[in-house]
Image (spheres, coloured by chain):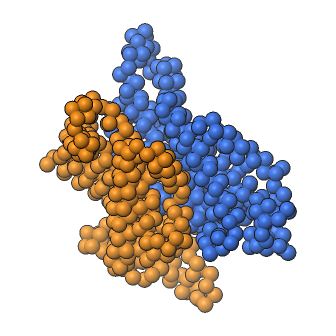
Chain colours: A blue, B orange
Amino acid sequence: MKKLAGAVLVLIFAAALGSDVLATASYRTQFREEPSAPPSAHHPLGTDELGRDRLSRLLYGSRISLMLAPAAALLATAIAALAGATAGYLGGWWERTFLGATDLSLSLPWMFFLMTVRALLPLDVSPAASITITFLLLGALGWAGPARIVRAAVVSMKRSEFMLQARASGSTGLGIVITHLLPNLKPVLIVQFLVSIPVFILSEANLGLLGLGVAEPMPSWGNLLRDLERFSEVRANPWLLAPAVMLVAVVVCLQIIAKREEFVA
Amino acid sequence: MMHITKHVAGLLLTALAGAFFAATLVRLAPGADSDERDFDPRLSAASIQALHGSRAADRNLGRYYAAYLRGLVRGDFGTSYSLKRPVRELLADRGPATLRLVGSGLFAGWALGLALAIIATQGKVGALKVFTSGLSTLLLCLPAALIGLVVLVARARWWWAIALIILPKVYSYARGLLDQVSKEPHVLLARAKGLGRARIFVWHVLPSIMPELLALAGISVSLAFSAAIPIEAVCDIPGVGQLAWQAALGRDLPILVTITLLLALITRAANVASDLAIAALHPQALPEAAL
């Protein structure tokens, strides 16, 4: 199952990365004589109401969502590793402050904050800036949950025999952290990274569906899903479901892989 | 008594810190000072200046927040910039719709999630297990706003959207717990003694998984309230979630701060309630720090 999920992900990633080659047009090229066209040999998924090729937009949108969600997950995992490992290793005042900060962070409605900050951006914000801000916010706000798990792992490692042996053999401070703690934290961090990716993909999709994700004309899964708001057209034009199918396929595959890694860790 | 006081203090601190954080984010976000009325050709320069003057007090975050807290003590949440009505009135108008949506959704989500988890672990029908797992995985992979759209297309009751968000979380967590507990020695012994399935479940399995389920119940309340925002926005439900969405788009600081405060309060209160319930039922299941 994991192999199949991995293969599907590789296929979708490859298609997204190769969008420059595979797409028949740029994501912003308008075929003005063919707005809202049904699928054809030229436009396999038809065109949108502005005459833009849907398949090309889906491929470019996949590239944005699939590149930036892991980047946001990497940022969140890095903050979690730093904060969680410091608190767990140093203990005392550091740990109490850390637990208070994560409690506060986990109690706050982050999705609502994201919406608010994203809505406050000027209307003429460039698509590149909107992408960067959206995913930086996602990364910066998603650290608390993984950080608690990292802290718990460090606390249990501190009591383990290999750490006792390391201390007995004269290793101290930074030496212990680099040589013993970090290598043993790797499986936990990998799982947290993998678990965060679908969360960020879904958050971006939610923001996009509300019109607050990546700004037009740049496509992303979130803003491509907005076509489904005209649900009366979906039955007659099932190809409008293509972004939703792609999103579900990627998130399912990522969850299968994350679950497997979690089990191994 | 001491730990209840500690929980209440933590609850108030979280709510106030959350509201202050929201106000800070709103004030620091680029474009927070701009107002679409600045570009209204019907307004004279003097009117625009008067508008700017009326918001000058809010520019100083400390002063705005101090005034907000003074009002809060009197039960006054301020007046909405865009809707020109007291925030308290707006919340009173829209609160019932959100409470109905979230309450019914939570109830249905928990009932269905638990029922499916029990059927999947206790039952012997393989196809049913595959179906419930598949459904749960699919629902976990859909954004809340898209689930709202699906409910809209199906013309089902709105609370189904919340139920479909809560269901997979309850199902996957409860199923994992049930699988784990059913292999524990005390359950195996009960089975070896020939006790009936229902009796084993009620007397041996349920008490073992209750602390974890109560913890999930606390989390699911905040999940449901967070999901209500995109669902109400997409489905055009006149609740607090839709108000929050409109306030975000309209940069309506009094509404934004009040809703953040309420959401933080609800999240923390739900977690505290579940901690207290666990402490009452299974004191040994809670870590020392939580007591």
| Image quarter in which the N terminus of chain A is found | top right
Q: On the rendered structure, is B126 left or right of A158?
A: right
Q: Quick check: A46 above or below B81?
A: above
Q: How many marks?
A: 0
Looking at the image, which residue is at 25% across and 46% down? B198
Q: Quick check: B209 above or below A128?
A: above
Q: Position of residue B272 (x, y in %)?
A: 27, 51
- In the image shown, does A10 or B31 lie closer to the viewer? A10
- In the image shown, does A131 or B54 lie closer to the viewer? A131
- List the single residue furthest toward the bottom: B42
Q: Position of residue B255 (x, y in %)?
A: 41, 71
- List the single residue furthest toward the top: A169
- List the single residue furthest toward the left: B1
Quadrant position of residue B19: bottom left
Q: Quick check: A4 above or below A37?
A: above
Looking at the image, which residue is at 52% across and 70% down? B154
Q: Position of residue B232 (x, y in %)?
A: 47, 70
Looking at the image, which residue is at 39% across and 82% down? B85
